[in-house]
Structures are given as C-alpha cells and as structure tokens.
Image (cartoon, coloured by chain):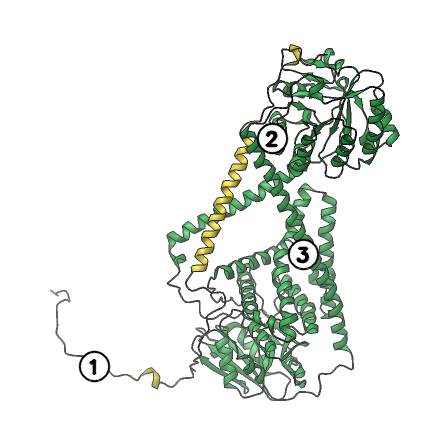
Chain colours: A yellow, B green
Amino acid sequence: MQRPPHGRAKVGRAVGKARLPAEDVTSLIRAESPEPPPVFVDPSGARRRRLRWATYAAGLLLVLVLAAVWVSQLTGPAAPPARPSCSAGACTR
Amino acid sequence: MTVYGGAPAPFDPESTGQIPAVRRRRRVLRVLLTLVVLLLLGTVVLVEVYTDAGFSPDGTDPRSSRDSAVPPAVLNGGPVIDFSGDTATSARMPAKTLALTFDDGPDPAWTPKILDVLARHHVPATFFVVGSEVARHPELARRIKAEGHEIGAHTFTHPDLASLPAWRRDLENSQTQLAIAYTTGRSTSLLRPPYSSFADALTDGDYATVRAVGEQGYLTVLDDVDSEDWKRPGVDAIVRNATPPNADGAIVLFHDAGGDRSQTVTALDRLIPRLQRDGFRFTTVTQAMGLPADPRAGAADVWRGRALVWTVRAADGVLRLLWVLLIVAGGLILIRTLVLFLFAWTHARRRRAPSWSWGLPVTAPVTIVVPAYNEETTIAPAVSSLARSAHPGVKVLVVDDASTDGTTAAVDALKLGNVRVVRIPSGGKATALNTGVALCHDDLIVMVDADTVVTPDAIHQLVQPFADRRVGAVAGNVKVSNRRGLLGKWQHIEYVIGFNLDRRLYDTFGCIPTIPGALGGFRRSALSDAGGLSTDTLAEDTDLTMAIQRAGWKVVYQESARAYTEAPATMRQLWRQRYRWSYGTMQAMWKHRRAVLEPGHFGRGGLPLIAVFTVLLPLLAPLIDLMAVYGVLFLDRQVTLLGWLAVLVIQILTAVLAFRLDREKLGPLWTLPLQQIVYRQLMYLVLLSSALAALTGRRLGWQKIRRTGDFSSAPSG
C-alpha cells in the first residue's frame, strides 16, 4: 500500500545561473524621454470634484425652484374676491 | 488616420470613480440630473406652448348658434351677468353712462397710446387683460391701475372657454387672477370670456361657461355696443359703431392688442369728446354697478403670481436665448459655406493651372516612418504599397510599438529590401514616431499609419512642396478605403468634404490645423524646431502641426498625394475614434493658446478660426435639430421644414462641390439626408462628452480599433 506523498525534507541553499536580460541580444530600443503631463488632465481630481458638487448644487436648486413653481400653480384655483350679490340689488339701477 | 492604438491607459489609483459603489451612486445621480434638465426643458416648452397657444383676436372664431338652454331673461337681459344669488341676474348700465372696455391687452405698442388718449380726456375705462401678456408686460398692468382704470380678467391665453375642460378653464382664470395679483396687488371679480359679444348671442356652451365661472364668484361682463375695431374698418366706421344708438347707457367694446390698433386710438380721440358733449358720463364697470372697488389680493396669491410671472419670463428668456444662438449658428454656417465655396474653388483652380509649380522637382531620398501596434491584418498591404512608391530612394521604417500579434512577422514575410522593422517598448504613437525619426537620417520624413495604403505616386507628390524652402510640413489627401456600409459611406463623405473644402480653405489662410497621421510629410528641421511629437495630447498630429506653424514654418496641403485608410466599421469604434480626435484637438488648441498673442499668421488668424469652426460651431449645431423638432411640433410646420430643408440643400451643395473637386463619384451622396438624422447627432454627443471630459480633467486612455483589412476602395497594384 502506497502512502500519500507528503512530508518534509530539508535542502540546502539552491543556486541557479542565468544571463541577465540586459545582456540578451535584442532588437528592442529603449526610448527615454521626459513626458510632460497631459493637457487638461487633473491628476488630483480636485477640479472634477468641485465641478461635480457645483453641478449637484445647481441641480438641487433647480429641482426646488421647479417644484415650487409647479406646486404654486397647481394648488387649487385662485378665487375672485367676495362682493355683494347683484340679486341683492347691488347691480340694478 | 490616427486610428492608432497602443497600450491601455494605466490604472489610476487616485480616482474614486473605479469603486463599484461610488460608480453606481454617480450613475444614479447622473440620471437624476438628466431628469432635472428634462423637467426644466419640459417646463419651458410647456409654458411657451401654453402661453402662445394659437392666439386669434376676438370675433374671428366661428360659433355654433344653439341657445335653447339659455334663459330668455339672460338672452334679453343686460351685458353684466351675475350668478351669486340663486338665479342668473342680468344688469344694464345706467342711462347716459358709458363703460369703455379694452380686450386682449396689455400690448407694449398700443396700450400706452390708448392710456394717453384716455388721460387726455380724463376718462376711466376697464381693461380686460390676457394673463400671459400681463406676465410679460407687468409695467403696463401697473400703469393701467395707477392711472385710475380698472382691470378685469380675459383668461390667461385667450382660448374659447366653452371648448375647454373645467380644470383647464379654472387654470386659465386662476392664473390670470394670480398675474394681476402680483403685478398690481389687486384682485378682480370681472371676467369677460374670449370671443364673447352681446348677451343675446350667448350659445348653450357659452352659457354653461358663464354659469360655471359665475358660481365661482366671477361677474361676467359682455358688451352691448361693439366698435368692431378688430376688423380695422376705418376710423369713421369705428366712431359710428361705438356711438350708442340712443340715450341708454352701454358697455362699449374695443381692443388694445392683437394687431395694428392705430384706428382705435384715433377713433377714441374723436369719439370721447363728442360723447362728452352729448352729455354721456364715463365710468368703470364696477362703479356703474355700484360695487366696491377691487380689494387687495391676498399675500398667498401675490406669491403664487410672482412664481407664475417669473416662470413665464424665464421660459421666454430661455427660448429667446435659444433662438439667438440658432441665428448665430445659422449665420456662421452660411458664412462658412460661402467662404468655403469661394476659397476652395479658387484654391483648386490655382493648383490645377498649368503654370502652377512648387519649384524644381524634389528627388531627395525619403524615409517613411510607419508606427504600428497590433496591425497584423493591415500592415502587409500598407508596407508593400509604401515600399513600391515611385520615388527615388524611398525607405520604409516600421516602428513596432510592442505589438503582441504577428505585426513584425507580417512585415518580415514581405521580404522587401527597403523595409526595416524596429521594435520598441510600449510607449504610445508619439514615442514610436519620435524613435523612427531618430533612427533615420534622411532630411525628408513621411509618416504613414499602418492601416493606410497609398497610391504609387503619393509619396513623390507629397514631398514636391518641399521645393519651397519655407514649407516645413505637407498634409496629404486621405480617403476612406472601406466604403461598403452606411457608416463607411458617411465617413467617406465626411473625409471628402473635410479634406477638400476645409483643408483647401485652411491652406488658403495658411492655418492647416492637422496634418493627418495617415499621410503627412515633414522636413527634419521643422520637426526638431517643433520639438518632435509630444505625448501630452491625444491628437499628436494636430499638436505637431500647430507646433511647426508656431515655429514659423509653412504647412501646405497637397491634394494629389492620396492615401486610403481604413475607417472604423462599427458605431462603437467610430465613437471612440472621434472622442479621441475631438478631445485631442481641444487639448492641442488649449496647449497652443498662447500662440494668439505671438506674432505670426497662425496664432493671430488661424487658431481662432479653427476654434470657431471646429468647436464652437459644432457645439451650436444641435440647436438646428432641436429647434426644428420644436418648430414642427408647435410652430409653423411648413416654415420649419423649409428652413431645415434649406440647411440640407446647403450641405448637399457643399458635398457636391467637394466631390467634384476631388473627382469622386457622386453615388454615395444619396446617404447624405440619412446622415442628418443619425450621424450628425452622434458627432454632437461625441463633441459634448469630450468637452465635458476636458472640463472635468478626466484621463482618457488610448483606444485600439479592430481591423478587418478591407481596402476594397483602394486602387489595387
């Protein structure tokens, strides 16, 4: 009967040798150039954040104003003022 | 052109936009914001449509004449009808007493003139105002009140009340009450329904309306003498019509709006003194009826009126702004078309003249630099067409930007003697081109995209302008090679117009904004003056072109140097390509914005011209479609469609000219009307979203286009 293959074994320091990639024969060319930061890009994201909050604020304000307008116009008709009735003799000569 | 990909953008660890929960939340907020904007536009459209709903002056509406439901007491009674008691009560004016009434105002042209006449003769009157006009001219309503006249309601938008449902009728009257409350601080109990006349002309429908509003508390005021001034019958006729037939009192009907009312003004000036001489007394309706003067409006009504008036004015303002912008855009398009026609035509004629020459023939050796990233499918036809160019000593240098497919192998398999391949680590198109320029030693360098096939003499033609020592760079004529589908045809049309008319125009003015990456020739010294290609914009070709011109070199267009490039074949790829172009163009313009202050042709004239025609005008162009939809739905349909067709005709003429100048077949132009409906709107959206990306400072990655290798329209051989 075979035992499952597990257990421990101690080995010494393993040493291997290989050529460094830098010494390899290659057609690759390394191009070094300092890259300027891309135009418009805001790495900190601060501009984006500010704009986002400004947009949300404007949106909220717009919602409130529009809601106020709609509510003000749809909350029941404005009635004409009370006045004496003509049948009570007000309008007749 | 410049449909070059490269390694994807690096993962940005500082952006919170990558977190799924944040992304979801932002998507919801974006949808909400869109809804708010739609609600705003909806309100504006609703208000405008509501307040301009087909106004026609009094008395022009054909009516039915059934009056079986109207009580005889009302039919034969006076012009003032009250329902506040149990039954309808009619009242007449006292003898020798006149109430002058003016309908449909206030009107900025005629109401002041009528008020002047009334003031001259010290006569009070009653103005039945249209609420939406009160909102638009609050100062006139205030003046009417301040000069001792009376204001009655004549609905908000002048509809035929009898034909409206009850809720709409109540809304009309309520909003008129609110508008009067805010502008004058008073309320009114007088109401005159539009299109009404004498009591004996009341129909069943009218009577139902009079009854309904009467039960709400309004006193309906009709008239018993009609001046018929809305017919403009002449001053004498108006005076005759408005004179009461006997010594009875009367309510006399005039109009102070709805067209030219000069006859009314003159007639009043003659009529009033004559009636005063005859012993008539002038008064307002409420005074004649012995009713108390209009009471103050409640604070709530004043506030609601304020909201209403400001909404109407804001909606008017928004619509007016849109019209002004539309007119500006239309004007610019027209000017641009005329200028294009004139200059492109002249440019073509000058170039075709037998006497035209750039100078001595240029035969100096040329190196063609081809940057490539995963171009396995297209690189072989591209490179072989380039290597077989009819120019002495032409060399091709393929710069493989760390492709992961068989790009290099595909070139090697061609086994062409004048083709060299170098591989560089991933660095983007600009770096690849710079490396290529550094690795060759010819004075003339041509840059061609790896998806582009050239005609045999294209390279030779392209370098001819270098005979002129001042020319630093030359733009070639790029055409779409895959024109099979609708998308291909649309892009073909766009390329022909863009390269023929626009570039000829820019060439005339000496301000070519872009040398296409698909085919461009450069003098080495111009490239070094510009500092090579830079990596800080996504449109390195536009950026380089601007830099070369800023350095003082001339950039010209050589239409006889033709290249065929593979255009994006799906909407998604097209979107990505255009997104990069428009974002990159904006980047390049912003980067070179200081050129405007520098001496020289490009900064002073060219850059602002490019900014107006490539960013500002396309951003305004959607208005043409938006207003066309608005016009077709709510305004004069025929005029709107004619206007829209006129724009289409202008575009067709432009396209035909471009195709003729480039000696292209006119066949694909049948897709032009379709282009107006899908393609144009897609381009707006691209421009809009890339402008937003620029504003917010988002980082855009490089996008790779999937190639099919379809060069069906390119000349074979």
Q: Distance between the residues labelled 2 and 3?
A: 42 Å
Q: Residue furthest left?
A: A1
Q: Residue drawn 51% across and 69% down?
A: B538
Is residue B300 in view from this perspective? yes
Q: Distance between the residues labelled 2 and 1?
A: 98 Å
Do callouts 2 and 1 mark residues in contact (Cβ within 8 Å)? no
Task: Name the residue type under label 2.
Answer: Gly
Chain holding disc 3: B
**Structural crowding at the residue carrying mark 2, measured as other residues with C-alpha within 10 Å and reported as few (<14), some (14–19) or many (≥20):** many
User: Mark 1 — residue?
Assistant: A15
Coordinates of residue B597 in the picture (x, y in percent): 60, 71
Task: Name the residue type under label 3.
Answer: Ala
Q: In which quarter of the image is the N terminus of chain B?
A: bottom right
Sequence-wise, the earlier of marks 2 and 3 is: 2
Tags 3 and 1 both on a single chain: no
Coordinates of residue B503 in the picture (x, y in percent): 67, 70
Q: In which quarter of the image is residue B344?
A: bottom right
| Tag in front: 2 or 1 | 2
| Relative depth, front residue between B322 and B278 | B278
Coordinates of residue B444 in the picture (x, y in percent): 59, 85
- Seen in the picture, residue B72 relative to B611 is either above or below; the reply is above
> What secondary structure is marked by label 3?
helix
Name the mark on residue B185: 2
User: Mark 3 — residue?
Assistant: B329
Q: In this view, does B169 lie to the left or right of B379?
A: right
